[in-house]
Amino acid sequence: MKRSIPLAIVIILGFLFVGYVFIPHKISSDFYEWYMEWMKAMSPFGVILGIMSIIMTHTARIQHKVPNWQYSIVTLIAMIFTAYAGFAWGTQEGTPFMWLFKNVQMPMGATMFSLLAFYIASASYKAFRARSAEATVLLLAAIIVMLGQVPVGVSLFGEGINDITHWILNVPNLASKRGIALGVGLGMVATSLRILLGIERTYLGGGE
Amino acid sequence: MNIFERLQMLDRRWIFLVVAIAIIVPLIIPFNSKTYTTEPTEKLYRLIDSFAPGQDEKPIEKDRALLLVFTHDASTMSELFPMEVAILRHCFARKIKVFTLTFLPSAAPIMDYAINTVKEEFPEVKSGEHYVNFGYKIGALMLPIILGMGEDISEAVDIDAEGRKISSLPIMKNIKNYNEMNLIMDFSGSSAGGAWIVYARSKFGANVGAGVTAVMAADQYPYLQTGQLTGMLAGLKGAAEYEKLVDVFATNQDPAKREFSRELLKDTKYDDAITNPNIKTKFKQARIGMNAQSVAHIMIIVFILIGNIGYFITKYKQKQQG
Amino acid sequence: MKCVKLYIFGFIVALLFSVGVQSNDLYAAPKAITDIKVIDIPNDDGTGLQIEWKALPKESRIISYRIYRGTSKDTLFFIGEIPINVKTGANSASMSYYDKDYNEFLDIRSPGRLKPEKKAGKTGPFYQKIPKDMKIVGPMLKDYSILGVIAKDEYYHKTKKITKIVNEKEQTYAGLKSSQITLVKKLIPGKEYFYSIIAVDEKRNYWPAETVASGKPIDNEPADPADFYATYLPETQTLSFEWGHPLSYDDINTYKIFVKSANDAAPGKLIYESNTPQPYASPDYAILKLQDQKVVKSGNVLFDFSKTSVDQCEFYIMFTDYSMLSSMSQPITAKYISKSDLPVIPRLNIIDKKNDKGDYNTLFWGKPVAYINSVQTVGKNTIQLSYDYGANCGYKVNQIYFDIYDKDNKLIKKVNEFFQDNIFKVKLDQSMEEQGELKVKIRFKYNGEVDEDYVIDQKLVYDSAIMSLRPSKISVDGRVLEDFNFTLMKKTQNTPLYRSLKKVSGIERESDDKVAYESSIFKGVSEYSLENNMFLVDTNIDVYWNKDTQSTISTSIYVSEKDNVVNKIKQQIAEVEGLIEKTNVPAEIEYYELYLTKFKNDLVAIESDNLLKEINSISNEKLRMKKIASIREVDKRKFNYFMMMSNGKGYVVEDSLNINEDGELDYVIPVSNWFDMEKLPTLIASLLFGMLVFVFVTLARKGKNLYIRPIAGIDEIDNAIGRATEMGRPILFCPGLSGIGDVATLAGLSILGRIAKKAAEYDTRILVPCRDYIVIPIAQEIVREAHFEAGRPDSFDKNNVFFVSDQQFAYVAGVNGVMLREKTATNFYMGMFYAESLIMTETGSTTGAIQIAGTDAVTQVPFFITTCDYTLIGEELYAASAYLARQPLMLGTLKAQDYAKFFILLFLILGTILSSFHITTIINIFPNK
């Protein structure tokens, strides 16, 4: 029972939504809209799951005094304070919540994002080795594209480098992207079909 | 362990340090580098420049205008903001009528910021006469506004960001719909121009241009190829090119040289922009940024080469030993 | 430990600082507005006011202006807000707010009780939005003209019948709670309204303005008509007029056109009068057919042009609004035109839009058009021409022929566009500048035949400003298409007036018209019931238009009140009869008689209406309303369409009316479709794929050995788990950043199931940080089940599957922290990833972990390949779970997938080859979307 009811829900709703794709009729789109309203109403409850998970994980860490448990205190305080700031003063422009968002959340996010520049450098240093013929092609393409993006490239090799860069991006690169996209599309259909037909049930927990 | 083996095992923190220096130094210490302009940018520049009033013409009388649409938030500002500033500077310098509009609440402050940044340098430019900020309109109104502007801009937009009736503004003289407001530039971090291409372009024949981040440029090229996009500025590079064109032509000291010409572009005396104190830093942000990008790209390429040299020598040695 | 204390200290200092900044007042610039003006909006219907005030300087650090309105000085309610960029301040010296048209009065977000803006003083006069409290909002209803918007089901079935004595008469109303109705308001002309403004600074302090200003909206005459044009076509004796759409047309009731002799000082004669289809936009043109040079209306000669010829006459137009205020245009003369100046208008066709929900009609007209839209250089003297083409459902374009000539009419190239990719290239002998001009002739092959008589001409002229050839306007038979626009119109059955739908360019060939399903009912609201806590609205509803009696049949929504409408008409008849008896002025009697006849006709129509009798024979309220709805909703969506073509300057051509076989106007209604035919290929492909799965699953069950290509990344999963076990360190599993609705996440979670089971068997800890709330319990359940199956329920710890953050980069920071602190030996990344992928994997590779990634995000694949030991690219992610399971059912689907891919490739190659030989059948099978 514990498995078969959820499975039945998945299969029935799954086929209904497949039907929605092919049936433009008012009944079908009204059903879809009605369902979407419920989705919107349901999703805020998910936040509770997240908050509970954070509280449970971190209180357990503090209780068991696992290494670096102090960080958990910071996390909990930050969470409670931010939530309090939002509830007490609102979330409009000019409130403490907005201040925290603009001066803590945004710069920290931007910092993480800018790490990419460093990591791309170190990753390409390690990865781009002319180990084989294919790797050499990859390496050369990477260098040409990188040069094509900056004026130095044109200074060194003339305007032709722009055309080569465009060609690399638009022909071999696009071709392989489309090839992958094709496989992804089929893979999605196959996986969805497995789930719809109840062949794949791992996502419900447990084995077959 | 010899030097090559050491290079092979190089601690990545050294790489981080070098990258940091390579990026920060060009930003702090300016140096000149040549900016090469490409055809899509030049084409866009020339189209916008063709909206400029003639020598004997009053700017208000001109029946051409440009609409800038801001469809991005602060996260992609580093790439898109220099473009917006460069185009606004072009418009203000050449007295081209320009409108600004956004459907994103988070873009409204950026729009204000861009206008004010450029306006400071052009005290003679007046809101309502040379430009109008249509302001933020809610997303639900996007389609009605895009379609409505095909008939009558004053009616579709109604009120500008300062609360004035559009129809009462002097700038609207000779400007009615897309026939006059002939170019729309959409700046976006994702797919730019979408709705404008579908509605303003195919229904009313308006020209649509796009300003996009470098990452998204590849996805937008097909539209450029099919002519659905009239022009495109891609990332910091596009912005840098436009900055240069504005420097060379639109703000040229000699009024006779303000029209586009290939010969003038080849003149090397315009290559000292970055160290030229007469050009405000805010008007060369993209070119300074491109300097940093150039150095960083070169650094990475150098690292790759060093890594490969190390790899081959080590392999060669192993072969000899083995 | 010391370090951690420092962290906490720093955090608290930061918090204190932030609060400190909040309470410190660093600026001394003025904050309160001193001068507010309330101005009547000109040319409107008397329902609009403009509130104007002087903007505060940038130094005041204002982030928004909040506007308040009331009908007395001491109670003002919040009505709107204008945000200001704190850094730059307001852009101009004066700010405005327009309080006009129907806008928000009361809705679901309104507060339940009266709430003062505490920051601006607890005792008023500033209050938050108008509250739902009937004691307060009820008496306010009379101060505005209020419209209620009610969801149709609420109005049909969920109202309460309430009787109330109004004007000493007992009236029945439908009562609705504030949660069932949204109220919008308009100001009442001539009534005084009070306004004030609060400036809000960046610390959210409220600075009320020093004054409360007041003003009265005044009903003004409409704006002066502009752009009025007249033309006269002597061949057909047709006078045509066209005028600009008035800016504020919300209360224009009639258009009148007058004529007078140019030398005559006397006032003009009325020759045309038409009502406007309020509240919809009106088509702004008129066509008068003269009879023997005379304007004749119902037998009366209104003007005789044989006495004063058209060229000696002046025309002017008058706009009149509902209060009989009017404005007049400048006199103009008619321009003489000939038939050849006018375009030939194509026939308008209307069909139901295919494959839709049934809320669109497709309107189409004319033959397809194509035109060059841009020219680019793509090499020495080679140009690339892009073109657009507009076709409609009447024509299936097979091929487009472009013949390119130089300026001396020498043919340069013939291009045959069989596949419309909208680009082709032309090689010129010289540069664009030297070429100067190109001429393009465009012809079509449509519906299988070449139309040789239909040729579109276009010139490409060199423009030195853009240094390129610029496409010019297109023409057919010498008539430029872009010079004329089409105006599409439609009307319902109960009115003779067409409303203007939209104006489309002369090169458009198709347009969809939305005929929305009715979802809301609009009713005026002026009464309320305090004891029921309800707003009261009228109970009558239109049922349908009876075309035999030419009247709208309406009835009450309550069975008990079904004779309501009849009684009301009878009452009106009695009243009018009373009036006739009282007066003896013949003009008044004539006027009243008109009404009397109308009311009597209505009475007969309603009493004799069979459909209404049928409705009223149903005694069950719900069934009766359902019957009414089923008739009403069909009837309201019937439209007759009409089209005209003009250049905005009086060159007007009308299409003929759309008439059915019986000679009556043809009213169409869109149909809701049961199957989207455009998706038929998708359905067939899906069914074929399903069949392939079935075949291979059956084969696998029968024990046939199915070969599956080995995937290194998947084969290596076991070793990676083993490595973590050997090292005694945990495994990290990252299920991607998207939610449970993404198939990639589902695929990732399926793999988690297999990995968690292995890990549980080896007794290795598995950490699953999540970004999506809904994924947490699912992942927990999967890991828990895996532990149970492995026979180690005791080793399951719920807290190993945990939530980090739903912010992208905060999540990455959290995961990186876990990697560094827990020293995970094996990291799996399975699902959807964005820009953060490299930051995670690069950190993972620093800690020396074995990393296996799987994603369908094409843009992130390169990052995974460079930093991970194994990467499952795209479809391999989806295959992984099935591959690991090694069950016939699962393997069957994998095998089917391979064959499906084979078929797709087959079609790709076939399509490419065939279309190279101009055979586009295969390509055209597939839908464009």
Image (cartoon, rainbow, N blue to C red):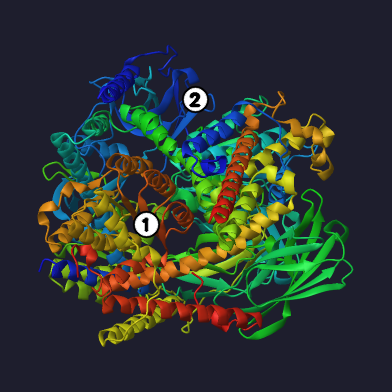
Q: Does residue C254 sit above or below C556 in this rendering?
A: above
Q: Residue at x 65, y 32 (%)?
A: B284
Q: Which residue is mark 2?
A: C89
**Front of the two marks 1 and 2:** 1
Q: Amino acid at mark 2?
A: Gly
Q: Secondary structure at mark 1?
A: strand
Chain to which mark 1 belongs: C
Residue indicated by mark 1: C852
Q: Nearer the viewer, residue C468 or B204?
A: C468
| Observer able to see residue C327 | no
Is residue B144 depicted above or below A200 in this figure?
above
Question: Where residue C905 sits: x, y (%)?
Answer: 51, 78
Instruction: Give the camera-side residue of B36 and B172.
Output: B36
Q: In the displayed structure, does residue C916 sit left or right of residue C54?
A: right
Query: Considering only vertical position in the picture, is A106 above or below C207?
Result: below
Residue C817 in view of the camera: yes
**Residue C696's quadrant in the figure?**
bottom left
Identified at 72% across, 57% down, the residue is C334
Q: Which chain is mark 2 on? A: C
Which type of secondary structure does the marked residue at label 2 adopt?
Answer: loop
How many marks can you see? 2
Of the numbered discs 1 and 2, the one sitting upstream in the chain is: 2
Q: Amino acid type of disc 1? A: Ile
Residue B256 in the image: x percent, y percent? 84, 35
Name of the residue lying farthest toward the top: C28
Q: CA distance from mark 1 to mark 2?
A: 52 Å
Name the side, left or right, on which C264 lies relative to C860. Answer: right
Q: Residue at x 38, y 57 (%)?
A: C853
- Give the quarter of the image for residue C304: bottom right
